[in-house]
Amino acid sequence: MEVLESSGAINSFVAYMTQKRSIVNSARSALMISYIIGVVIFIESSITSLIAGAVGKPLCDREGVNRAKLAYVCDSTSAPISSLILFNGWGALLLGLIVTQIDSGIIQGDSVSLLINAVVFNFYSISALIVTFAVIWFGLYTPSMQNATLYPSKAINLSRKESSLMQMFLPILFLVISVFVFLAITGDGNILKGSGSSSIFYTTLTTMLFMYVLYVLGKKMSAKNYFKASVAGGKKLFPIAMILLFAFAIGEVTSELKTGLYLASFASENINIHLLAAVIFVLSGIIAFSTGTSWGTFSIMIPIAVPMAVALDGDVALVIGAVISGGVFGDHCSPISDTTIISSLASGCEVVEHVKTQLPYALISALIALVLFLVFSL
């Protein structure tokens, strides 16, 4: 992101979008670009947030949109879309958890079909995407969101010839393609079995090399400025890395204390079948919020929720959908979630401000999801 800015690629992109093509000429269109990117790029929630933030930040700054709004859009499209379009690590994890339940004899049937049916009941992710679109389109901002910190935009004066998409588009395209390549490499040919964290690490390194060739050898910037920007970007990441380090530590402590299992024990006895999905959704949300991880919540709750659904003769797909929804909801609200922190980083917004301004919208989406779980349970 720092190299993109130093190379002039971002200025060129902004000039193209606002001056040459006039695609972005309002606050709504600036945020909508990030929303569309967040929906289209579903390979991994962190990559989704980073790209949506990198593209949206200069556009939002130019149109006078505070970065809390952009952080909300980045965060509200990353995990929700990744948990709905499961051609990624999310799908691999959930499929593995369901297969475990089938292999243990708790449920029967085809794991892929069951997962597809469960995704239909992922009400929180669906409502979050709809609510976010409505907020952008109709400008439905709370006072705290509307009055969040506004950063001044930089004046950009480029000729029509200098304004171009390619300087910024090519590295992003290379980055997206590289994720799939390294997922296939780390998964021995199977993308769904690839290592997400390793793939992103290798992708970032190769993209930096690609940008060196594109910008330095292409005479867009000097080698000195390239390495200077790289170091500056690394320095900006250091406080974010420390926040993530302590966030993961807190999550690990709560896991070791069996916080999730302790909370689940309260809901496992004497529960009404018509309240099962709603209770599972709320419980999953609490666990994800306290641990800062949706994936950890899935691993805790699916082995608990599925046997409960079977024992009560409930809809297994609906209950799995409730676990997915609750995990995404809690992760979405948690100040120690990696997606929350990365969305703040990508948007240039303070983490605390992002959490505070996003929470009302997340609660609205959660309320819609809760009502739908109660209705479908009946």
Image (tube, rainbow, N blue to C red):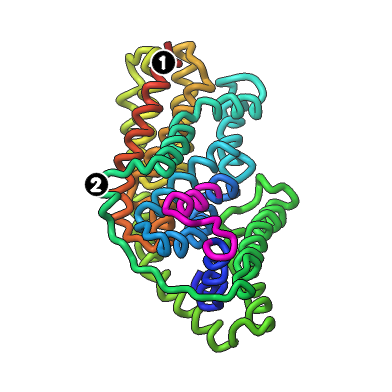
Looking at the rendered image, the quarter that the C terminus falls into is top left
Residue 25 falls inside the magenta stretch: yes
x and y percentages locating residue 191 in the rendered image: 69, 48
Q: Residues within 10 Å of mark 1 (few under 14, many from 20)?
A: few
- Tell me which label, 1 or 2, sits earlier in the chain: 2
The residue where tag 2 is placed is 143
Q: Secondary structure at mark 1?
A: helix
Quadrant hosting residue 282? top left
Of residues 161 and 333, which is closer to you in this image?
161
Label disc, if present, on residue 214 of the rendered structure: none
Residue 178 visible in the current orientation? yes
168 to 130, vertically: above or below: below
Which amino acid, by three-letter code, is at mark 1?
A: Val
Residue 332 falls inside the magenta stretch: no
x and y percentages locating residue 29 in the rendered image: 48, 51
Of residues 297 and 13, which is closer to you in this image?
13
Q: Which range of residues does the magenta coloring cover?
A: 18-36
Kindly report which numbered mark, 1 or 2, lies closer to the viewer in this rendering: 2
Which amino acid, by three-letter code, is at mark 2?
A: Pro
Q: Secondary structure at mark 2?
A: helix
The residue where tag 1 is placed is 375
Name the chief secondary structure element in magenta: helix
Residue 327 visible in the current orientation? no
Of residues 99 and 89, which is closer to you in this image?
89
Q: Residues within 10 Å of mark 2 (few under 14, many from 20)?
A: few
285 to 271, vertically: above or below: below
